[in-house]
Image (cartoon, rainbow, N blue to C red):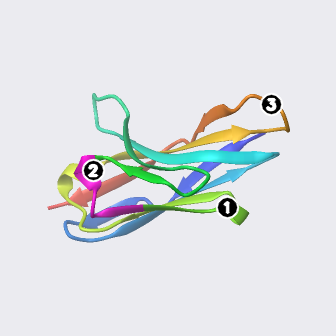
Amino acid sequence: QVQLVESGGGLVQAGGSLRLSCVASGSIFSVRGLGWYRQFPGKQRELVASVTSTGSTNYADSVKGRFTISRANAKNTVYLQMNSLQPEDTAVYYCNAQLQLTIGATIGVYWGRGTQVTVSS
């Protein structure tokens, strides 16, 4: 069974940094796009950053210049380095992966369970 497991969330003071990690485990043929989303209370999940299989990245305007997404293909892992964190970054952060489980299979979208990031002022 395929799982995405996030780690690295926690409590940090404004101006601080956190690094989120997400590992995709299980029987996976190919890892395509990877991304991080976040969800504020009472709001819909929103894209924070994404990285394609070729390394192209995309960021939400609110995090450009502060957050960096990267991937380690050999480890089926995606990272989110978050610097200069602000209280408005407080949210649950979810890992997202587009996976092909077997050769020729349809690419599916998978989600982690989320990790809480809290930034105190």
The x, y position of residue 63, in whole percent, is 28, 54
- Between marks 3 and 2 in the image, the one whose residue lies nearer the viewer: 3
The image position of residue 91, as x and y in percent, is 32, 46
Q: The N terminus is located in which quarter?
A: top right
Chain part drawn in magenta: 61-68
User: Label 1 is placed on what type of residue?
Assistant: Asn
Q: Secondary structure at mark 1?
A: helix
- Quarter of the rendering containing residue 32: top right
Between the residue at mark 3 and the residue at mark 1, the CA separation in whole angstroms equals: 19 Å
100 magenta-colored: no
Q: Which residue is mark 3?
A: 105
Helix, strand or loop at label 2? It is loop
Instruction: Please tell me which of labels 3 and 2 falls first in the chain.
Output: 2
Q: Quadrant of the C terminus?
A: bottom left
Q: What residue lies at 19% left-to-right and 66% top-to-bottom?
A: 14
Task: Give the quarter of the image for residue 120.
Answer: bottom left
Of marks 2 and 1, the one in the foreground: 1
The residue sitting at the bottom extreme is: 16
Q: Residue most toward the right?
A: 103
* Residue 30 picture location, percent across and down: 75, 47
Q: From the viewer's side, name the closer residue of 54 and 66.
A: 54
Q: Give the residue type at disc 2.
A: Thr
Q: Which residue is mark 1?
A: 73
Does label 2 or label 1 sit earlier along the sequence? 1
**Who comes first in sequence, dot 3 or dot 1?**
1
Position of residue 17 relative to residue 102, above or below, is: below
